[in-house]
Image (cartoon, rainbow, N blue to C red):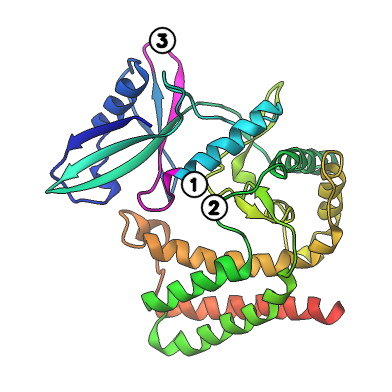
Amino acid sequence: MSKLNYRNNTDEGQFTTLFPQLVIDAIEQTFGMVLDGVMTPYPSYINRVFGLTDENGNRFVVKYYRPGRWSPEAIKEEHEYLSDCAQAEIPVVTPILDSEGETLHELVLENNGSDVTYYFSLFPLKAGRNFEANSDDDWLRLGSLIGRVHSVGKTKKCVHRLECLPEKTTHPFFMELQKKEMVTPDEREEFYGLIEHGLKLITPLFEQVACHRIHGDCHAGNILDRANEGLLLFDFDDMMDGLAIQDLWLLLPDHAHKSMKEINLLIEGYQQFCPFDNSTLKLIEPLRFMRMVYFLVWCARQQSDYDFSRHFPGWGTKAFWFQEIEDFRAQIGIIEEILDEV
């Protein structure tokens, strides 16, 4: 893994130290290319992603991983999954190799005696239109794509990534929220009680389930429709070990009981390439509950970031937590209805 060192005198540990010229210099030195000097920022709340073009007009995307979020070993597992998919001729975007065959690199900014390490990777730019499923055939295509990705995912398990189970992720996330004391005092007791009740309901449902490598954040925003090439799945940043249904339910237009047609079409397409356990359908709403908790932690970790308040106005206020209580109460109600039917 190549390592570049720079001295910087701005605030340490923040993406604000990642000046455009540093990004350009790092790519040129690592890959031996000459860029045209223009850097286009792309929307990404967790990492920093920029578009670049070299002197020959070739277009690239560089991703700088959020410091402290993933270890180098965890990032390499993402790259390994992408490589495995590409070898199986599944449409994904794989990172570019440097002259030594490495896909992960680090930029170290020395700042007032401390080092801040940014891991980064370079990808080819893949253009396409955002995909929206509007027909039965569209849902079948989506299911087929995920089935192909999972057929490769099942060949290995993660070592350095999260496992999408309540006791492995949601319980620790909830403890993190409590430790940070994010919830306003008047709403704290009721909110904590709801989460504890929800976890008590869903945790037994995940006993003895089979997990394997999955995309982890498989929503429509991470799928492109490319002319003459079909659907392309990208942004494997949240890849993890989990259930197949985790990569399917995020594509649904509504709660499970209102999306049975779409679920059946997704599974039909999925099973063309990979078997599917229909008993896991009952876990869709528990998984939604888990993602709701995760999203709160995701925001809590980034609330001090530049521009966070503009994208999430009112986050963390008394009114915000009151609404969260209502949302979690409604979600738990749906889960209880499902359990009554089982």
User: Compared to 128, does 283 lie above or below?
Assistant: below
Q: Amino acid at mark 3?
A: Asn
Tell whether label 1 touches label 3 (CB within 8 Å): no
Marks 2 and 1: in contact by CB < 8 Å? yes
- Residue drawn at x 24%, y 29% is 21
Q: Which amino acid type is marked by label 2?
A: Arg
Circle 1 residue = 74
| Mark 1 vs 2, N-terminal side | 1
> Would residue 31 be visible to someone looking at this image?
yes
Write the residue at 55% across / 29% down: 94
Q: Is residue 314 above or below residue 41?
A: below
Label 1 environment density (alpha carbons within 10 Å; few <14, some 14–19, many ≥20): some
Tell me the SS state at disc 1: helix
Residue 260, label in figure: none
Image quarter of the N terminus: top left
Q: Position of residue 31 (x, y in %)?
A: 37, 20
Residue 235 position within the rendered picture, expressed as x and y whole percent measured from the top left: 55, 41
- Going from N to C along the chain, the mark reached first, 2 or 3, is 3
Question: Can you tell which of label 2 and label 3 is closer to the viewer?
Answer: 2
Q: Residue at x 22, y 46 (%)?
A: 115
Q: How far is mark 2 from mark 3, CA to CA?
A: 37 Å
The stretch in magenta equals 54-72
Local crowd size for mark 2, using a 10 Å CA cut-off: few (<14), some (14–19), many (≥20): some
Task: Looking at this view, name the residue that lies furthest to the top.
Answer: 56
Pick the quarter of the image with the C terminus: bottom right
Disc 3 target residue: 56
Within 10 Å of the Cα at label 3, are there few (<14), some (14-19), or many (20+) other Cα atoms?
few
Which residue matches tag 2? 161
